[in-house]
Amino acid sequence: MRLRALAKINLGLDVLRRREDGYHELRMIMQTINMYDQLDMEISRKPGIKITTNLPFVPVNENNLVHKAAKLLMDEFDIQEGLTVDLQKFIPVAAGMAGGSSDAAAAMIGVNRLFHLGLSVKELMERGVKIGADVPYCLLRGTALAEGIGDKLRALPACPDCYVLIGKPGISVSTKFVYENLHANQLEYHPPIDEMLEAIQWHNLNKIADLMGNVLETVTIPHYPVIEEIKNHMKDHGALNAMMSGSGPTVFGLFDDKKLAEHACEALRESHLARTVFLTTVFNNGGRRK
Ligand code: ATP
């Protein structure tokens, strides 16, 4: 069984406060894009979960989120058979695009189907949060408001169709570092999430682009100026707007014109500012899971 695990970007990301337990209370506008990892899953007679992958630095043991997700369901339903998963990764790793969480979501869908567990998406989402805060959203997909630690979800009307240029610089940014340096309870800047919700209701792409904002940039950009350089490069080449996704370092730009987007993509490749450059589109709620 072949499944696609789609990446996400954040059109808006606000941090409301740091909770007593150390978690951050977030308010995010999530958007799935047509950039994906591919999972080939099969039942095997040999018990256990065996993962293979194309990237040598991604764990294939119980630390892989695919393993955790599959094991969670297989233990609950006392499944005696084994599972093999070949994971082909194309979503940049540790990049703010929820690659691992989306792989976990796809693995849950796969186990549910292969072993005929009969769980609804809602029931998978309730279990998925145990793997990671972004997993329920990766099961829901499309355009959504995520609150709490990212697990309280409200599906939104689809974001208007547009082109999304992805540029990930060749640096690693630790999510832990970003949140530790945010000083969440003394923030002066908050992205306009409520106005963004209205712009999505009105299906107004220009307004959505104008209102994009990510509070985590206040930490990353001073430390990693290349993020700002990629944003400026995209804007200089016709992006309606450009912003960092999640805790970075991936930058995305929105375009309403295909030719312009292709030209910006080519120019970004030639600039060598980004190591991964990829042009794609937004994925909307109406689509059925493949
Ligand atoms: P988020 O947007 O949720 O912050 P991310 O893009 O920062 O996610 P991931 O790509 O999901 O981060 O992976 C972060 C770490 O998790 C990696 O460094 C890797 O060691 C580990 N990991 C576990 N399972 C996976 C997986 N299936 N794919 C990628 N990384 C995985």
Image (tube, rainbow, N blue to C red):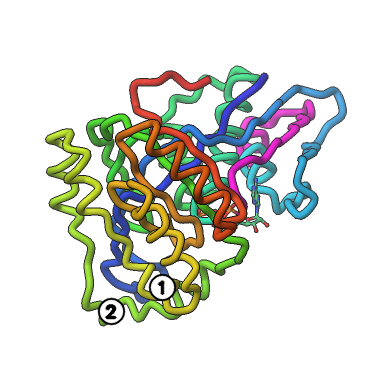
Q: Residue at x 64, y 31 (%)?
A: 38
Q: Name which residue type carries label 2.
A: Asn
- Using a 10 Å C-alpha cutoff, classify the residue at mark 1 as few (fewer than 14 neighbours), some (14 to 19) or many (20 or more): few
In primary-sequence order, the first of circles 1 and 2 is 1
* Mark-to-mark CA distance, 1 and 2: 14 Å
Secondary element under disc 2, as helix, strand or loop, is: helix
The answer to whether residue 100 is visible is no
Q: Residue at x 41, y 73 (%)?
A: 21
Q: Residue at x 71, y 36 (%)?
A: 87
Numbered mark located on residue 73 in the image: none
Q: Position of residue 29 (x, y in %)?
A: 30, 48
Magenta span contains residue 77? yes
Residue labelled with disc 1 = 21
> How many labels, in total?
2
Q: State which mark lies toward you, 1 or 2.
A: 2
Q: Position of residue 78 (x, y in %)?
A: 68, 31
**Can you say whether 235 is above or below 200 in the image?**
below
- Using a 10 Å C-alpha cutoff, classify the residue at mark 2 as few (fewer than 14 neighbours), some (14 to 19) or many (20 or more): few
Q: Which residues are magenta?
A: 72-93
The answer to whether residue 240 is visible is yes
268 horizontally vs 259: left or right: right
Q: Position of residue 15 (x, y in %)?
A: 30, 66
Placement of the N terminus among the 4 image quadrants: top right
Question: Dividing the picture into quarters, in which one does residue 36 lie?
Answer: top right
Numbered mark located on residue 185 in the image: 2
